[in-house]
Amino acid sequence: MLTRLLPLALLTSAFALAQTSPLPCTLAVKLDFESYDALSQTDYNEANADESSFNYAECRAAQLGDELKNFPQLRARLEKLRGLYRQMRALEGELAYAMAEGGTVHTHAVPRSYPGLEATLGSLAALARSSLGGQMDKRYGASLSESRTAFEQRVKALKAWTPKQASSSFYEPRAFQQSVSEYAQTGAQIMTILGNRADVVTATGYLPLQSALFVDEYLREF
């Protein structure tokens, strides 16, 4: 299980070492992420960059929760999606770590994906409260289908993947396939929550499934 747990351990230790000066959320939500990141870090390093991304995303998440206080069902759905999106990215980092024979870049990429996920959740919230969100079009259906197909093909490739090297200290078949199974289940839960209507809000919710942290590249490379 060492292979399974190491990336999460690295992430925890990185946060512990971070020396950021988080800006108040009341200010953070008025800033784009690049501005927040530049203003909140007193000394740039990888751990600080991770924590900056995490703090900004948490501020955005809190703001969205406040905006949706009169829409409890929508807020609950988006909170569930947030957890699943983040879990999906964490599993991608974990799988990529094993595929590439280690590398803390995979750990750092997970919290740094959170601001982008919050942007998607913000779009979903706006669309769900607007008549525009229910607009249907062939392009939305095509995008939804592309996202689903990309995810399903990725899972299929991961199930068949083995390292080219005869032995690897970072790859343990049972742990790797357990992560693949959890990854497949996470994506399936996301699609169940979103449904399959070919409208703009559903297609938007599917977009995080269309690409992955490192994994698509590594399936071709390793």
Image (tube, rainbow, N blue to C red):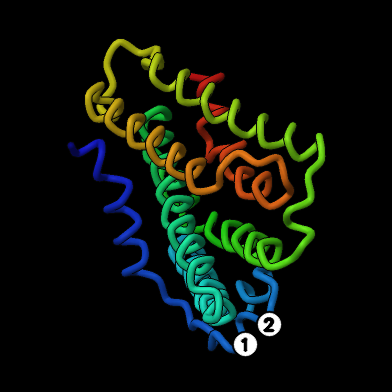
Q: Is residue 76 above or below residue 98?
A: below
Q: Which residue is mark 1?
A: 27
As drawn, is 133 to the left or to the right of 106? right
Query: In x, y percent, where is residue 150?
Result: 59, 28
Identify the element where label 1 is drawn: helix
Q: Is residue 198 visible?
A: yes
Query: In x, y percent, where is residue 93?
Result: 43, 42
**Residue beneath the point at 32% across and 46% down:** 7
Amino acid, disc 1: Leu
Closest to the observer: 52 or 88? 88
Q: CA distance from mark 1 to mark 2?
A: 5 Å
Q: Is residue 87 above or below residue 39?
A: above
The quarter of the picture where the N terminus appears is: top left
Q: Badge 2, how many Cα within 10 Å: few under 14, some, many 20+?
A: few
Closest to the observer: 53 or 142? 142
Q: Is residue 155 above or below residue 57?
A: above
**Residue beneath the point at 70% across and 40% down:** 198
Label 1 with label 2: CB-CB less than 8 Å: yes
| Label annotation for residue 17 | none
Q: Which residue is mark 2?
A: 30
As drawn, is 99 to the left or to the right of 129? left
Identify the element where label 2 is drawn: loop
Dividing the picture into quarters, in which one does residue 172 lie?
top left
